[in-house]
Amino acid sequence: MITGVLTLLGVLASNSRSQAVTETRLEELTREVREHNNFARRMPVVEEQIRVMDRRIVTLEKLKD
């Protein structure tokens, strides 16, 4: 009986620690996904700015000649 109770307490303590580690990992993954999504939203804006800069450079090069 005593062994069973001690085993049960050990299992409960182990599960509690495991749950804490899982929650920490989940929070870190959630943060990384949010960073990625923010990056993915900004990329089209950056690409358009690069196209505009390229057109301006071409125009300036034509004016120089």
Image (cartoon, grey):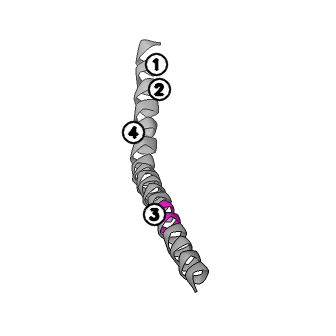
Q: Looking at the image, is mark 2 or mark 4 earlier in the sequence?
A: 4
The residues bearing labels 4 and 1 have C-alpha atoms spaced at a distance of 18 Å
- Residue at the spot of label 4: 49
- Residue at the spot of label 2: 58
Contact, CB < 8 Å: mark 1 with mark 2? yes
User: Residue 14 got which mark?
Assistant: none
Q: Position of residue 14 (x, y in %)?
A: 54, 67
Query: Residue 63 appears in which quarter of the rendering?
Result: top left
Q: Looking at the image, is mark 2 or mark 3 earlier in the sequence?
A: 3
User: Residue 61 got which mark?
Assistant: 1
Q: Position of residue 42 (x, y in %)?
A: 39, 48
Q: Position of residue 33 (x, y in %)?
A: 47, 57
Crowding at dot 4, Cα within 10 Å, few <14 / some 14-19 / many 20+, comes out as: few
Amino acid at circle 2: Val
- Residue at the spot of label 3: 20
Contact, CB < 8 Å: mark 4 with mark 1? no
The residues bearing labels 1 and 2 have C-alpha atoms spaced at a distance of 5 Å
In what quadrant of the picture does the N terminus appear? bottom right
Amino acid at circle 4: Gln
> Per the image, is 18 magenta?
yes
62 is higher (above) or lower (below) than 55: above
Per the rendered image, the range of residues in magenta is 17-21
